[in-house]
Image (cartoon, grey):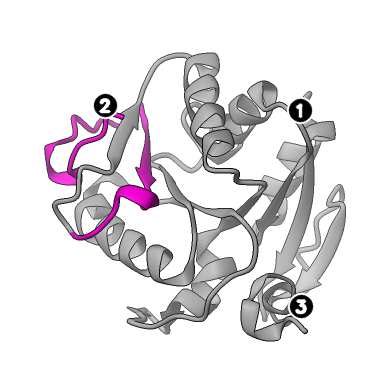
Amino acid sequence: MNDYSPLSSLDVTNQCVVVCHLGLWDGPESPAWRAVKGTQDDVGLALAAVLQDRGVRRIDDFGGVCKTFLCDGEEYRHAPPRITGNAAVFSFTPKKRLAAEGLEMARVAVAAGYRLLVLTLQKHDKFGKVWTLCGILRHLTGDTMTYYEDTDSVVDDLKGSAEADRVVAVHVQTPGYEDCISRLADRVVTQEQYQHEVLLQHTT
């Protein structure tokens, strides 16, 4: 599409969701990025269309979830393990960290085999994680989406929404936070169980 640009040239505000088409990524200046703006339905329609175009049926949150194998501590890996299936990385990344972290996240996500990278610049409320996911789910067609998330309140807010039936929400427990258990998750798994489910090297 001609509406993708390098990340450095995007008009990014806190009232948008940033998406990277990883199939167009081949370096920091790749025209692979879009800033999606508008109402919740505008954002949901645009993101649902690109998710469906890329065949994505699974969304992996970053921190506490796919970061466990995309990074070694706080360092992004050069050769992360490969994933199974068609999936997207989903992350809350504040605007002030977008330029540096977005590029590294795109690079490592491509290396692992992800199809898309979706970044919210807000964590909560309008343009936040649940707001964005609900907009996407409302406009998806076909099978339900599977979503892995480590924050129990995000899972519960999503599963308490009108779009709950469109998503299988899996709560990935972070070590040390075992007492923070989602009330509404479809499943609760450890980080090790999550990796076993999504990494190619663990399949038989």
The magenta stretch is 1-27
**Residue 111, image x and y in percent?**
40, 71
Q: Residues within 10 Å of mark 1 (few under 14, many from 20)?
A: some
Q: Going from the N terminus, do you reach mark 3 or mark 2 first? A: 2
Task: Name the secondary structure under disc 3.
Answer: helix
Q: Nearer the viewer, mark 1 or mark 2?
A: 2
* Residue, disc 3: 193
Q: CA distance from mark 3 to mark 1?
A: 26 Å
- Residue placed at 67% from the left, 30% from the top? 137
Q: Amino acid at mark 3?
A: Gln
Say whether residue 28 is left or right of residue 159.
Answer: left
Give residue 5's position: percent from left, percent from top: 20, 37
Could you tell me which secondary element the residue under label 2 belongs to? Answer: loop
Confirm whether the magenta stretch covers residue 178.
no
Q: Which mark is residue 163?
A: 1
Amino acid type of the residue tagged 2 in the rendering: Asp
Q: Is residue 13 magenta?
A: yes
Question: Which residue is rendered at x = 25% and y = 55% of the image?
Answer: 97
Tell me if residue 108 can be seen: yes
Is 173 in front, or is 21? 21
Give the mark nearer the N terminus: 3 vs 1. Answer: 1
Quarter of the figure with residue 119? top left
Quadrant where the N terminus lies? top left
Q: Residues within 10 Å of mark 2 (few under 14, many from 20)?
A: few
> Is 26 displayed left or right of 147 in the figure?
left
Q: CA distance from mark 1 to mark 2?
A: 28 Å
In the picture, the disc for residue 3 is 2
Q: Kindly state the secondary structure of the residue where label 1 is placed.
A: loop
